[in-house]
Amino acid sequence: MPLEPLQVFTWSLLLVMIVEFYAIVVPGLERGPAIGLGCLYGVFAVGCTIMGFMACKVDPMDHNVGAHAGAGSSTQERTFCFLCQVHVNKGSRHCRYCDKCVARFDHHCRWLNNCIGGTNYRYFVMLLVSTLGLTGLQLALSIWLIVLFHTQSEGDPLYQRIDDRYGSLSSDGYIIIVYVFAVMVLPFVGLLIQLIGFHMMLAREGLTTYDYIIREQKREREKREKRARKEAGAQAAREARSSTHGRSSVTNDEGRDAPLAATAGRQQTRPRSMV
């Protein structure tokens, strides 16, 4: 598939973050923590690169499609895809972006420009974990440098390291760069925490993202139907009460008119008896 803008943005952003970490964050740390945390960040960066590459390159297409059409279990254990014109596994779904059936379809990821299915789902989850480790470490160390900057003064260790390593860059310029990247990384950390929690919930319930969306749509549709039935029942009850009240009013009016009619009849018959 051709490159997607979001895919290019993802890899470019990863490269920029790695450069900023080793060029700005690490030099602001003391030698011991700089070496240890730099190595740890490198592990996360390598994990992001490898897992992202695998998630992009592994084809999650159903094995019954293409060269393998007609292979596998009997058609009773499969379902027919009218777009692929072949029987595929029951857990497979046709992706309209990739235009193919994906085995155990989870979702189409625009950031990776590939479908996430049974064969590359583990790489996708490991990519999320690696990226959370990378961005979380970068955010934590950026916050630590910001705290040190505002609690120390000229001549203290952080300012000395900045002067030694960035002679032409003022301490204010240095901390502005740290602030910019901390603010940029923060929403990604929140998004990754939410995504990992969401996929943990899916694993616990044995669902895919597609299954979850279909289930929630069904529940929402059932709620709307239940609400509509309830409103229809309430409307019918109001109409029934209104109809009952109308009949009661007519009966009461007839009851009040009956004595008057009887009295009028007696008054009309008396003169005739006197004559």
Image: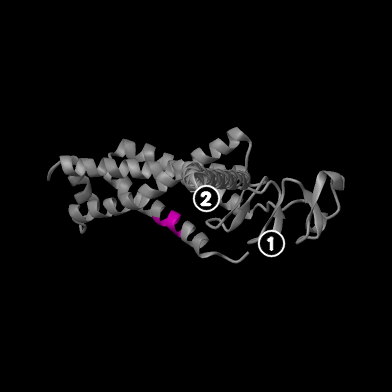
Q: Look at the image and give the residue range highlighted in magenta.
A: 12-16
Taking depth in this image into account, of 16 and 255 the one nearest to the observer is 255
SS class, disc 1: loop
Q: Which residue is mark 1?
A: 99
Taking depth in this image into account, of 260 and 115 the one nearest to the observer is 260
Q: Residues within 10 Å of mark 2 (few under 14, many from 20)?
A: some
Q: Indicate yes or no whether the magenta region holds residue 163.
A: no
Q: Is residue 252 above or below residue 14?
A: above
Q: Is residue 47 visible?
A: no
**Residue 137 x/y as whole percent:** 38, 41
Kind of residue indicated by mark 2 = Thr
Taking depth in this image into account, of 210 and 112 the one nearest to the observer is 210
Residue 76, image quadrant: top right
SS class, disc 2: helix
**Residue 207 x/y as whole percent:** 63, 39
Q: Please tell me the numbered disc located at residue 49.
A: 2
**Residue 99 x/y as whole percent:** 69, 62
Residue at 18 percent across and 54 percent down: it is: 172
Residue at 52 percent across and 50 percent down: it is: 49
Residue at 58 percent across and 58 percent down: it is: 113
Kind of residue indicated by mark 1 = Asp
Q: Please tell me the numbered disc located at residue 207.
A: none
Q: Main secondary structure of the magenta part?
A: helix
Mark 2 or mark 1, which is nearer the start of the sequence?
2
Residue 97, image quadrant: bottom right
